[in-house]
Image: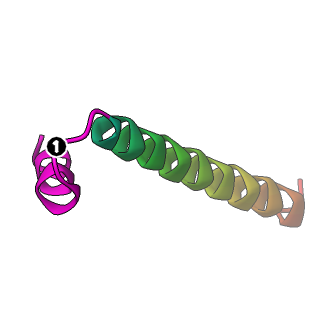
Amino acid sequence: MGIVSAVDRTHGRRGLSPAVVLGLGISVAVHAALLVFLHSQRFTLETPI
């Protein structure tokens, strides 16, 4: 993976780097899903049935 190799080159060869990248990816995915969910909820609430 390019991201992991870039992090390894920046911070040196640590076993923590892939875990940090994975954690950041998961948090970004969770935030994106939460934003999409909230936006869809607001959209359905604003849309008259």
Pointer 1: residues within 10 angstroms few (<14), some, or many (20+)?
Answer: few
**Vertical side of 18 occupied by 39: above or below:** below
Provide residue 17's location: percent of width, then percent of height: 30, 43
Provide residue 46's location: percent of width, then percent of height: 86, 66
Residue, x 11% and y 47% (percent of image)? 5
Residue, x 89% and y 53% (percent of image)? 49
**What amino acid is found at the position of numbered circle 1 in the picture?**
Arg
Q: Secondary structure at mark 1?
A: loop
Provide residue 35's location: percent of width, then percent of height: 65, 58
**Vertical side of 20 occupied by 40: above or below:** below
Q: Quadrant of residue 43?
A: bottom right
**Vertical side of 20 occupied by 28: above or below:** below
- Colour mapping: rainbow
Quadrant location, the N terminus: top left
Q: Is residue 35 left or right of residue 45?
A: left
Residue, x 35% and y 38% (percent of image)? 16
**Vertical side of 49 occupied by 20: above or below:** above
Q: For residue 6: magenta?
A: yes
Q: In the depicted view, which residue is nearer to us: 29 or 23?
A: 23
Q: Is residue 19 left or right of residue 5?
A: right
Q: In the depicted view, which residue is nearer to us: 39 or 33?
A: 33
Q: In the depicted view, which residue is nearer to us: 46 or 29?
A: 29
Q: Main secondary structure of the magenta part?
A: helix
Residue, x 23% and y 57% (percent of image)? 11
Q: Mark 1 highlights which residue?
A: 13
Q: Quadrant of residue 32?
A: bottom right
Q: Is residue 45 left or right of residue 28?
A: right
Q: In the depicted view, which residue is nearer to us: 39 or 25?
A: 25
Q: For residue 47: magenta?
A: no
Marks counted in the figure total 1
Q: What's the magenta region?
A: 1-15
Furthest-bottom residue in view? Answer: 46
